Amino acid sequence: MGGYIPSTVLQQEEMLKEAGFSSMKDLYRDVPEALKLQKELNLPKGMSELETARTMRRLAGKNKVYDSVFRGAGAYRHYIPAIVKSVVNKEEFVTAYTPYQAEISQGVLQSIFEYQTMICELTGMDVANASVYDGAVAAAEAISMCRTPKKKKVFVSAGIHPDTLKVIRTYSWAASEEVVVLPLKDGLTDLSGLDSEASCVYVQQPNYYGVIEDLKDIAEKAHALGLQVIAGMEPFAMCLLETPAECGVDIAVGEGQPLGMPLSFGGPYLGFMAATTKMMRKLPGRIVGETEDTEGRRAFVLTLQAREQHIRREKASSNICSNEALCAMTAAVYLAAMGPEGMKNAASQCYAKAHYLAAELEKSGLKRCFEADFFNEFVTECADPEGLLARLDEKGILGGLPVENGILWCATELNSKEEIDALVKEVSA
Amino acid sequence: MKTLFERSVKGRSCAILPELDVPACLPERTRKQALRLPELSETDISRHYTELAGQTFGVNDGFYPLGSCTMKYNPKINEQTAALEGFADVHPLQDNVQGCLEVLATAEKYLCEITGMDAMTFQPAAGAHGELTGLMLIKRYHELHGNTARNKIIVPDSAHGTNPASSAMCGFTVVNIPSAEDGCVDLAKLREACGEDTAGLMLTNPNTLGIFDKHIREITDIVHEAGGLCYYDGANLNAVMGIARPGDMGFDCIHLNLHKSFSTPHGGGGPGSGPVGCKSFLAPYLPGKKVVCEDGRYAWQDRGPESIGAVRSFHGNFLVVIKAFTYLLSLGREGVPAVAQNAVLNANYLKHLLEGTYEVTNKGVCMHEFVLTLEREKKEIGVSAMDIAKALQDYDMHPPTMYFPLNVHEALMVEPTETESKETLDAAAAAFLEIYAKAKADPEAMHHTPYNSPITRPDEVKAARHPVLRYQFDD
Ligand SMILES: Cc1ncc(COP(=O)(O)O)c(C=O)c1O
């Protein structure tokens, strides 16, 4: 109906005349007639705002929102503090472009600087970028950082998220790089196939099946063969388990969605990337740095741009232009609201609730598949996953995800004991 | 102003979570490293970000003619529909998502109609990500047709930096071709560049000078005859949507920036969405799953073994697609071309107002944007494109894009968009003209602009030479 066009028809006519055109059609005099669309678009007629709102509400109503969710597998439902949405809905943040004009973009720039600092704190690493598209792309980009003309092979654990593996395979295929998958043994990455011909190894902590890997051991063995080590980290797990830096990882990446972003049917999410200072100039995407203005006041700017596409074009280290800035701000506000104690507490709650859930499920006959300890996800055996999940669905419960040989369950601080007990009751029924 | 870390007070916190209601337990090996997140009250956080918002210029603050970025108004209804629980609180791996699938299928149908393509993926999260995806389709096509020698992508010098960068990421060699005098593709140079090793051409049309290339059909024919494919960078679709379709111009695949042409906000640098559309012969190579509809039921379907795989987890930036879809519903078949016409009208009107004073590279009709060059002023009075841009900040508007495209010296790229009124354009023109007069009268003063922004010009050299990329704690 509308196109959010403020000029009245009269004004449009005035402007056309003033600029020397006889009609709207005349504006397209350079477009060859044969190329012009000779018909109306096959789209419905435009709607008023009320009709649009009604249509979208009807569509949203066709999706099921669960009362309780025990499914993670790369997308996690956590509690989102009210302050988070209130801050990131501010129109200035929502509607600004990438902060090219530093003088009038200090707000966005500082928020990214603060986000970078927090990612460094979570991972223990030296530097972080301003974000990439999601955790899977962050993994693929980290692998590109390690690539050398001579070493066109990478190792990845079979314990990484299947979508991440797909994205890595796709990016590596484009770069003519071989991807070798290291199998799992008892739920943990089996390193016996490692060799020194690859550039790096990518593992996930905790892995896709929830199991806590011995990251320190992986890093040591890989380094001994001259490989770089990339770890895909779950943000809460980093607050409780040894940090990637403590384990000797070279590049830590991950999916930042759990930090204040709703499930959103898969996006927008947030790929975070942090590295050692040595790898700093290989990082893709935007990076904000601190400097001074001409009066000596603290100022923030986009920096190390010699890496980037608009300067280096085909020689750039990555093609990233727009990233996930508002998601990065979401994560920063979330982390500020939680604080250090809040994050540690939330992480311990995730751990404790998942362990309570696992113990209770075991009592009801769903045995865990792997012995090694886990963070907030784990796999159990299940004879009839479909039947069980359908029963849970009727009660408004989204059960775990069916995987090979069983079900992948997840618990977060959001799952109360009451909810967990209700789930277990259904399982036993 | 203070950072969050400087506002932090030990022991301060927000009360977010209840006490643990199950037995406590801990893993064997735990983190030893300190976790120095700020300790703040909700008041602190709220005021901090309100202050930061005050130092951020968004589309809602004023005119934002940032060329190539299509900074149109971001309708509020889009934000509201994307926040609906039925979209925002849905797990990407759950069933019972008929609404989500219907949106994806319908958005694909509408956008294919607008672009003249046959199929589309919503996995790419931004324009550059879409470019990479589209180039992968081209790579796959040649690979499956045994054309492994086709490893070169032709890119005009007026192209956005992401074009050559994406080509290189996709393992292609980039062949840069200089533009003709008028800024369009030089047909002779293109013919010279085409050959047995040509994988394809990447092109923006209207190009980055805001010109619709009259020879577009010949261009795509030349590339096709040489055995290459044609990629359309859809960043400038706003000028021609509903008027002419890339599919009819001979392009084989395209990316859209939903965060440009389709009104979704930029968020200070994302999230965006860069769906890739293609002709049916490339469709089997698209990444991710496709949505199919049978008897009114929607379902996911694998694309098969020829697919390039995935370029992102799950289904892309879904809520951004919701916003763009909401916009499409509002516009409808009559609104889409009206947007394009008014975008082009606004650009031509503003160009007309500036033309007598500033040098415009495009003498004829422009599309949705035009480029000014300050080359003469830089030479004669030492005033650069940067100086003019910074001066504009003092007139309550965001400056145009600077120093792009690269084939114009001292470029300022102006894209007003259709959501600006005649009054805004008149005021902006007055600001441009006043600044020009000031620059002539006192060129030296121009180097110190802006005068009224929260900071003066930052030292970028220092930032790059001595990188400080995180807050430094005292301890
Ligand atoms: C012509 C053109 N192509 C591609 C892009 C890249 O888009 P994105 O920032 O969404 O990656 C841009 C963005 O500015 C552009 O202007």
Image (cartoon, coloured by chain):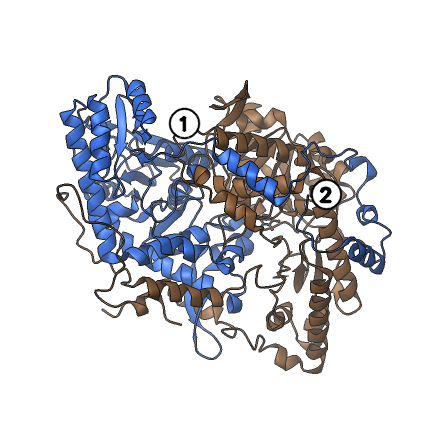
Asked which secondary structure carries label 2, the reply is helix
Pick the front one: B183 or A301: A301
Instruction: Give the residue number, with chain letter if any, for mark 1.
Output: B95
Rendered image quadrant of residue A16? bottom right
Colour brown belongs to chain = B
* Residue appearing at x 49%, y 43% in the figure: B82
Q: Quadrant of the C terminus of chain A?
A: top left
Question: Can you see residue B230?
Answer: yes
Instruction: Give the residue number, with chain letter if any, for mark 2.
Output: B337
Q: Chain of mark 1?
A: B
Looking at the image, residue A289 sits to the left or right of residue B449; the answer is left
Colour blue belongs to chain = A
* Residue appearing at x 74%, y 40% in the figure: B243
Which numbered tag is attached to residue A122?
none
Pick the front one: B144 or B59: B59
Q: Given contact means CB atoms under 8 Å apart, are the residues at marks 2 and 1 in contact?
A: no
Above or below: residue B347 compared with residue B149: below
Asked which secondary structure carries label 1, the reply is loop
Amino acid type shown at disc 2 = Pro
Question: Can you see residue B154?
Answer: no
Q: Is mark 2 within 8 Å of ligand 1?
A: no
